[in-house]
Amino acid sequence: MEHTTFSPLLLSLKVAGVSTVIVFLTGMLLARLLARRSFPGKGVLEALFLLPLVLPPTVVGFGLLVLFGKNGIIGKWLLALFDLQVVFTWVGAVIASVVVSFPLMYQSAAAAFASIDQKLEQAAKTMGASAWKVFWTITFPLAWPGLLAGLLLSFARALGEFGATLMLAGNIPGRTDTLPVAIYSAVVAGRMEDAAFWVVIIVALGFSMMMWLNWWNGRRLRRFTEER
Amino acid sequence: MLSVRLYKQLPHFTLDVQFEMNGEILVLFGPSGSGKTTILNCIAGLVQPDSGWIRLHGVSFVEDKGKPLPPQQRQVGYLFQEYALFPHMTVEKNIAYGMKQKEQSWQKLEPLLAVLGITHLLPKYPHQISGGEKQRVALARALATEPSILLLDEPFSALDEETREKCRQELLRIHAMWRIPFLVVTHDRDEADKLGDTILFLDRGRVSRVQRNSDK
């Protein structure tokens, strides 16, 4: 294991962290905007949001490559305006993670917002609260358990993202070899010990996150049911 | 004075009512699905009528032309049917939610809290108190914003008969203290007679009869 460094772990945490912040904010915002609104094409739009969930990651990766490649619609534009090249960079890994984990956040947030009794928000409004105050004092705290579940799922999904990342960001040691990519290349190169090392780390991370979420949900449930 | 003229197409019939009221208790009585709650929602600004007007003490909430006044600016107290207390806030936070000047408002509210007997509930959460207590807390919360009118949607329907009778008496006393128009929605005839100075009988979106109670 002489070549093993922690760089895949740090890179993975960086990519998943940035991706989760983006996904949390956009997923929450879009879910809030679309909740309780109906317009022609809403079904199509929502199906489009959830599409990455049912597509093979390689298909997502292919699509992103076409969009963000040097000659892609967005890639060309980014290159011309910002001199930014996302293919084979960690930014590419972030984009791949965002696209595959967005559906999880969107679904969790949409369900969380839909579960809130509309009368609570209406009551707040009649008491003079602005739309902004209603959101931060009523909607957000009541939706928080669902939003947090979405956040953790998105983070876990981003941490485990492999297919689309490999296609868009490649496997450049020290630059785009996130944990799952590092595991794959270690196995291909016959470095089973390296692979096992990373596997243990990623399993421990995922397991402790889910354990914590379960514990937190249980505690919350007790708080709302005790002392009746 | 509240002056209402509403016209709104609902799924099964058309809501078409007109009435006026002063600082009295006006009861909207009718079977469920006769448009009572929609009238309250229009006055609160949660729903917009297709046409008509709503004016309270010279302030226009809705006119045939022009934008409706947002609910935040109407100074309407609304007691929802299931109370709609915020489950994640204590009774104290619930009541204080709409207060503009906390200290002054609490002072003003003290006699009301005493009449309602809910002062000891302030640190509790809504799930820790009984149905009758929730009803009183919701009433205090609706009045804490110092509204110009109070809307009550089936205020006692979730209570048992004994508590209901007690709450009715309280409501009459509070009305005498507060002296603002109370608009009560109910499908309970007995309740309508006991509370209302005026009763509007609603049937499929129209007022079918008006009854004035001189001796309630």
Image: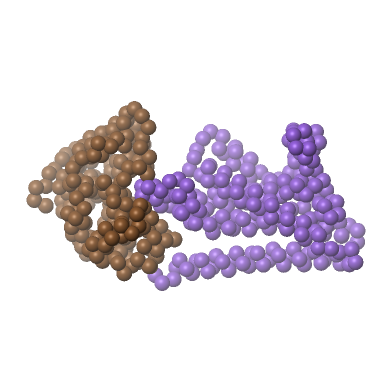
Chain colours: A purple, B brown
* Residue B148 coordinates in the image, percent (x, y): 26, 46
* Residue A95 coordinates in the image, percent (x, y): 72, 46
The residue at 74%/63% (across/down) is A202
Furthest-bottom residue in this view: A227
> A188 or A85, which is in the foreground?
A85
> A115 or B44, which is in the foreground?
B44
Note whether residue A58 is visible.
Answer: no
Note whether residue A55 is visible.
Answer: yes
Furthest-top residue in this view: B65
**Could you tell me how many numbered marks the image carries?**
0
Q: Is residue B140 left or right of residue A43?
A: left
* Residue A225 coordinates in the image, percent (x, y): 44, 68
Q: In the picture shown, does residue A185 fall above or below A40?
A: below
Q: In the picture shown, does residue B151 fall above or below B169?
A: above
In the picture, the quarter occupied by the N terminus of chain B is top left
Q: Is residue B150 left or right of residue A48?
A: left
The residue at 91%/58% (across/down) is A189
The residue at 84%/63% (across/down) is A5
* Residue A131 coordinates in the image, percent (x, y): 45, 45
The residue at 51%/44% (across/down) is A35
Q: In the picture shown, does residue A189 fall above or below B211?
A: below
